[in-house]
Amino acid sequence: MTPDMVIKLAEQSIYTIIIVSAPMLLIALGVGLIVSIFQAMTQIQEQTLAFIPKILAVFLSIVLFGPWMLTILLDYTRDLFEQLPRLIG
């Protein structure tokens, strides 16, 4: 296993992690921004107010994007297992 192979494998792993986590992070960011604007407009300074909508939004994004995320992870895992003989040998 050469250093180039390790770098390529790490690059594929990081890319997959970013792609899979992006929908949840972007939805949580959007909901957090909306809640922050609402808090600024109403001058409600409750710290825990932002958590419940974010948790619900992330859960909903997992339900909506779950099959797509699972497909991406399964494709990555399948590709990794197909590369395994070349990585070891």
Image (cartoon, rainbow, N blue to C red):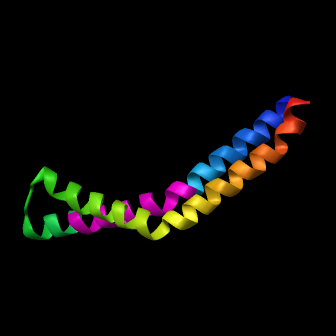
Q: Position of residue 80 (x, y in %)?
A: 76, 45
Q: Position of residue 7 (x, y in %)?
A: 77, 37
Quarter of image, res 11: top right
Work out whether residue 32 or residue 1 is closer to the camera in this orientation and state it: 1
Total marks placed:
0
Q: Position of residue 64 (x, y in %)?
A: 44, 70
Quarter of image, res 63: bottom left
Quadrant where the N terminus lies? top right
**Residue 80: in magenta span:** no
| Apparent side of residue 72 relative to residue 29 in the rendered image (left or right) | right
Segment colored magenta = 20-35
Work out whether residue 54 or residue 38 is closer to the camera in this orientation and state it: 54
Quarter of image, res 39: bottom left
**Residue 21: in magenta span:** yes
Above-or-below relation of 81 to 32: above
Would you say the magenta stretch is mainly helix, strand or loop?
Answer: helix
Which residue occupies 13% across, 70% down? 41
Which residue occupies 83% across, 30% down? 3
Above-or-below relation of 56 to 2: below
Which residue occupies 43% across, 60% down? 24
Q: Position of residue 18 (x, y in %)?
A: 57, 53
Above-or-below relation of 35 to 6: below
Which residue occupies 70% across, 52% down? 76
Quadrant where the C terminus lies? top right
| Apparent side of residue 8 relative to residue 62 in the rendered image (left or right) | right
| Apparent side of residue 25 relative to residue 19 in the rendered image (left or right) | left
Work out whether residue 81 or residue 14 is closer to the camera in this orientation and state it: 81
